[in-house]
Amino acid sequence: MAKKTNTENQKIKDLKQFEKDAKNKVLTTNQNLKVNDTNNSLKSGERGSTLLEDFLLREKITHFDHERIPERIVHARGSAAHGYFELYESIDQYSKAGIFTDTQRITPVFARFSTVAGSKGSPDLARDVRGFAVKFYTAEGTWDLVGNNMPIFFIQDAMKFPDLIHAVKPEPNKEIPQAASAHDTFYDFVSHTTETLHNHIRVMSDRAIPRSLRMMEGFGIHTFRLINDQGESHFVKFHWKPKLGVHSVTWEEAVKINGADSDFHRRDLWDAIEAGQYPEWELGIQVVPEEDEHKFEFDLLDPTKLIPEAMVPVQIIGKMTLNKNPENFFAETEQVAFLPGHIVPGIDFTNDPLLQGRLFSYRDTQLSRLGSPNFHQIPINRPVGEPHNNQRDGHMQMDIPKGQTAYFPNSLSGGCPHLAKMAEGAFTSYEERIDAKKIRSRSESFNDHFSQPAMFYRSLEKWEKQHVADAYAFELGKCNQEPIKERMLWLISQINQDLAKKVAHGLGLDIPKNISQPINQAIGADADIKKQQPPKQKNYPESDSTLSQAHTKFESIATRQIAVLVADGFSIQDLKKMKGPLEKGGAILKIIAPHGGHILCDEGMKHRVDAAIMTTESVLFDALYIPGGKKSIKKLKEDPKYRVFINEAFKHCKAIAVDHEGEDLLKETFVWEYKDDQAVFINDTPKAFIDAIAKHRYWERMDLAAKLPV
Ligand code: HDD
């Protein structure tokens, strides 16, 4: 595949042959019979009963009745886009994969982002892990990197996955709550399963409520292997780093966004791509030589542990750009099937017991979700290039395999399809030496469940720590069972005493002196909790700056949404002053006015309104600008919603700029009392405002903001 950066990659070309466009076409049945009435069924007389003969009615209704397929058991709610991956530098010393050695090719990708627990129609800003699945259509076959936006997972063995998911999903008797982990069954499970604590504290952090899907990291989580052309193996962890940095909203905003625009993330991804502001992530690898496998305090095969970047730095090797929205949501985003078992020569699995179980589960789930072993023939799932083998038939067979034979070996078809030679790029599994007993148990090396969540918490900035404490207090506050809350409190106290104290205060409970052994022993879970604790301080870094969002990128205001509050008579000169520099930086200004349609500036020109105030909310924006204009400000003062809008932006630590008479509106909000705040700009330069927006939030305001009502 030649190096090209437009949307015409090989996969997009392949998909085009399946696209249908009804433009200037006549309405037909599925048999291509022209239809001149699709509104009325065939009846015995104008007011008579419908006739069984009505094949047009039956075709239309039958198809409609069967339009739905089962939603994914997890990750049902998702959004996806096409794009491409390009390699910066060859890593042939580690891997022979074409995608990792050929810097001249661009590899088509399809990436799907998702929440885990909610149903297909659930709101985007649930507190949850985000799925981060990428399908690479490589020249040597399809590689699926099916990861999350967190570098670790809740459990160590796939055997526990159904329990984890049953616990977090709505409770089975009443199907409540939707897309929320804040309920008894989840915390019943977590409080009895200490291996969940590391991923769980991440879910309590801001990572679980991203500002945008474009502003979150991705991780392959498991340790995989890279295999070079000498057959040598290196352990590897995959990282996606967003070019826009990692940013989140606050929990209060998340709750409000879910009501104001439950498609907030989906819309944001779609709009950015339509606007040509293509999301980008760099791919990084952490490589560990085979001989260093046992060098760490934790087991590389344990998916609840990360390798601190301070110990093994991430090497950036390439970049993914998403530059095309799907043509059809169902055909592409819904029908895409990711399988961790899809790998290519140069990449291989390890014995991580979670990964091993996943290798079974994903193929199996597609059979019930997509209904046929031929799901790989659905256009979005087809590899680039034509696959050949002796698999035949099955529901919805789309191919027409030619010839007399469908077995191997054969002579009647000249031995075809023939076996690939190694020189032709055949896949072969890494020859790992195995000498072991068959055993159903957990390795002792997986035991320490506390050091890494503790390191994570220690690495956070003050504002991030506060958010974590608030999140625990919220989630446990929603639980009804006191013993579950107490048990959680005790476990949190084993991670960090200060954190536990804050959560205990929020719950109005004392931290128990010890764990409630009777419940524990009765259900046999994690019976000996002492085992899971580090016996003494382990050899971890005190902190790792990459675990905190305070050390992410704050360079750009690209794609930031700026609300501009105006009414008729606003100052066009003020707006011009801000608009040019903001748009130059890639920000998007949205005119919010008392009504839709158009408004007039003070020079009598018409301006298109992006949203009437009644249709939008402060939480949907990154920053706020109020130009002057006597008449405009007078009008804005009449509607209290503008004051709420401004107060909320302040409470959520956003940058606010006003010019000239805009000051008068600010005087009617509680922002006026804090007008010396570092991110409030009165008649200031665009640069000052832009620098503050690039910082995402002015967190120093957080303690004050917490005390302000809205
Ligand atoms: Fe999974 C979907 C990520 C463990 C079983 N998983 C799914 C998706 C993502 C992940 C991103 C959505 C893919 C898409 O967009 O279609 N899952 C993970 C990660 C895990 C993980 C990062 C741990 C490191 N998953 C996991 C285990 C099991 C499953 C241990 C079962 C034993 N996952 C599934 C599934 C899903 C799925 C039920 C639902 C829909 C699908 O596969 O295609 O098979």
Image (spheres, rainbow, N blue to C red):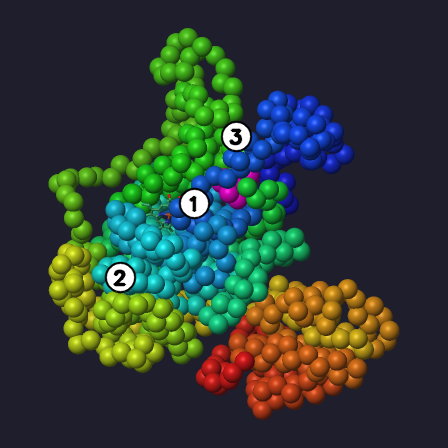
Expressed as whole percent of the image width and height from the top left, the position of residue 9 reads 60, 40
Q: Is residue 626 magenta?
A: no
Name the quadrant of the C terminus. Answer: bottom right
What residue is shown at x 45% (from left), y 44% (from top)?
Answer: 71
Circle nearer the N terminus (3, 1): 1
User: How many other residues sit within 10 Å of disc 1, few (<14), some (14-19) or many (≥20)?
Assistant: some
Q: Is residue 10 visible?
A: no
> Tag 1: residue type?
Arg
Q: Separation of disc 2 and disc 3 at Cα?
A: 49 Å
Judge left or right: residue 197 versus residue 445. right
> Tag 3: residue type?
Gly
- Find disc 2 in the rendering and name its residue: 188
User: How many other residues sit within 10 Å of disc 2, few (<14), some (14-19) or many (≥20)?
Assistant: some
Q: Separation of disc 3 and disc 1 at Cα?
A: 28 Å
Q: Which stretch did the figure color magenta? A: 331-336
Name the quadrant of the N terminus. Answer: top right
Ligand 1 lies under 8 Å from the Cβ of mark 1: yes
> In the rendering, which numbered label is found on residue 385?
3
Q: Is residue 696 visible?
A: yes
Say if 298 sits above or below 13 in the image: below
Q: Nearer the viewer, residue 86 or 124?
A: 124
What residue is shown at x 41% (from left), y 74% (from top)?
Answer: 467
Ligand 1 lies under 8 Å from the Cβ of mark 3: no
- Find disc 1 in the rendering and name its residue: 72
Ligand 1 lies under 8 Å from the Cβ of mark 2: no
> Tag 2: residue type?
Asp
Judge left or right: residue 426 versus residue 504. right
